[in-house]
Amino acid sequence: MQTQKEGIRKIILQVARKEFIEKGFKDASMRNIAKDAKVGLSNIYNYFRNKDEIFREILSGLLSAMDKVMEEHNSPKYISVDIFSSEEYMRSQIDMFVKLIDNYKEDFKLLLFKSSGSSLGNYREEFIELQTQVGKEYIALMKEKFPTINGGVSDFFIHTMSSWWMSIIGELVMHDLSHRELEDFIREYMEFGTAGWKKLMQVKD
């Protein structure tokens, strides 16, 4: 019985995903989802409380992955001036972001462009604010460990860079880049950004 219930739940999520991709959250219909999943409209609420819960469940993998990126951003291994010259660090960041885009391309499209009307409708703005706070904390941690660097980077600059990164993710998922093109771009972005931050924070060789 439990296995059957899990199977129906999985079908509902698969059908709902297709509905959300085609119509976006706002215009997606619970009636259509129930019909295509061959589940009674009233019965679908035995599996999910509402359309928003289905939407969040579909995006749960991406949301967890983004939370992990933020959690790891200020980990001790990154509080080091070596990140400005380490090929190992560069490679790890490239691999992480390429994997993120490769694994969640359609999910990003849903989250960034088709979530209006859902509880995730303001995710972009909320994530930018979170990333801004994490960025400020990162600079403070770097300043504490390396007193000679410039820790006076403006909050608005950090906010703008956070907003820029979210815009870049949007561009990446909306264009049909090959794995190699995606990897090349992430490396270009990382090299460009690393050199800029090194100059701005006045990190000496």
Image (cartoon, grey):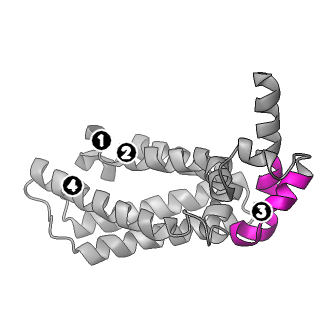
**Prevailing secondary structure of the magenta residues:** helix
Q: Residue at x 65, y 50 (%)?
A: 49
Quadrant in the rendering for residue 17 = bottom right
What amino acid is labelled 3 in the image? Answer: Ile
Please state which of the two labelled residues, at mark 4 or mark 1, is closer to the viewer: 1
Name the residue tied to disc 3. Answer: 21
- Of the numbered discs 3 and 2, the one sitting upstream in the chain is 3
Residue 76, horizontal then vertical, whole percent:
25, 39
Q: Can residue 136 be seen in this view?
A: yes
Name the residue tied to disc 2. Answer: 71
Contact flag, marks 2 and 1 (Cβ < 8 Å): yes
Name the residue tied to disc 4. Answer: 205
Contact flag, marks 3 and 4 (Cβ < 8 Å): no
Circle 2 — which element? helix
Q: What number is the disc on residue 75?
A: 1
What amino acid is labelled 1 in the image? Answer: Ser
80 left or right, relative to 31: left
- Of the numbered discs 3 and 4, the one sitting upstream in the chain is 3
Q: Which residue is drawn at 50% across and 65% down?
A: 123
69 left or right, relative to 169: left
**Is 18 a magenta residue?**
yes
Q: Residue at x 21, y 65 (%)?
A: 201
